Amino acid sequence: MKRFLILFIFIISGIHLVAQCELEAKIEYELYRRDAPNELVSTQDIEEKRFSAPAAIHFYGEGSGEIDYRTWYIYNKKDLANPIARYTDKDINYTFEEAGHYLIMFEVADSSSECVVADTLSFQITESDLDVPNYFSPGNSLGGNDEFRVAYRSLVKFKCTIFNRWGQKLFEFTDPAKGWDGRYKGNYVNTGVYFYVIEALGSDGVKYKRGGDINVLRSR
């Protein structure tokens, strides 16, 4: 009987401690969206938390109760035993450049560290892709295939150089979201064949080295 009472008191004490743990933790986030209509990311991808690298994300640590400690853990799901980053700020920014599945944990605790509550968030950084067009119509109609732009996903490094038939460099850009408007020294180039060389690195480690011709179908 004495042993039963001790066990009963222990259980009641445990319930009492849990009842006093009135902290709440919640993760909110905001994905920095690039102005890149040629990036291969759909609305469904965003809704299902599939992001294209480099994915810059602002994480907000929401919570209630007497919170004294806040800790963020960022894990690649291939290794949940070792976080790739740890922070103690209320809100954090992090840029993901490698393809994979990730887990974010936001943990809050009281001054005694006996009451600890956490929230988690999972998402995917997609593998890379690159598709290069072979023609465009600069100066023909605004917004109607009037720029040479690649279609891409999860490229963390990029450089494209444009040449004429004599090997003269006309243009170079390093942001895959941008492109060439068909101008050289302020004027549209003549119709004809031009050439591109692309070097890029994907979030999955894939190295791209592409070269080919660009047909300028019309220009001013």
Image (cartoon, helix red, strand yellow):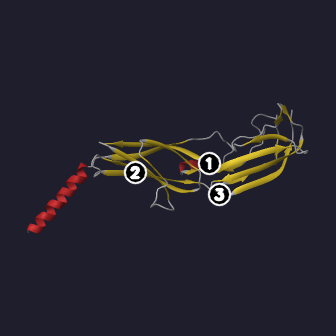
**In which quadrant of the rendered view does residue 91 lie?**
top left
Mark 1 vs 3, N-terminal side: 1
Identify residue type, mark 2: Asp
Image quarter where the N terminus lies is bottom left
Residue labelled with disc 2: 119
Mark 2 vs 1, N-terminal side: 1
Residue labelled with disc 1: 42
Which residue is found at the position 59% from the left and 54% from the top?
98
Give how far apart the Cα atoms at labels 2 and 1 are: 27 Å
Q: Nearer the viewer, mark 1 or mark 3?
A: 3
Q: Would you call the spot at circle 3 few (<14 residues within 10 Å), some (14-19), or many (20 or more)?
A: some
Identify residue type, mark 3: Gly
Give how far apart the Cα atoms at labels 1 and 3 are: 22 Å
Identify residue type, mark 1: Ser
Q: Would you call the spot at circle 2 few (<14 residues within 10 Å), some (14-19), or many (20 or more)?
A: some
Q: Nearer the viewer, mark 2 or mark 1?
A: 2
Tell me the tag on residue 205.
Answer: 3
Q: Nearer the viewer, residue 38 or 84?
A: 84
Which residue is found at the position 67% from the left and 42% from the top?
37
Give how far apart the Cα atoms at labels 3 and 2 are: 31 Å
Which structural element holds mark 1?
loop
Q: Nearer the viewer, residue 205 or 121?
A: 205
Q: Nearer the viewer, mark 3 or mark 2?
A: 3
- From the top left corner, tell me how far across and down residue 26 is, in percent: 40, 46
Image quarter where the C terminus lies is top right
Which residue is found at the position 83% from the left and 51% from the top?
212
Up the image or down, 86 lies above or below 171; here it is: below
Which structural element holds mark 2?
strand
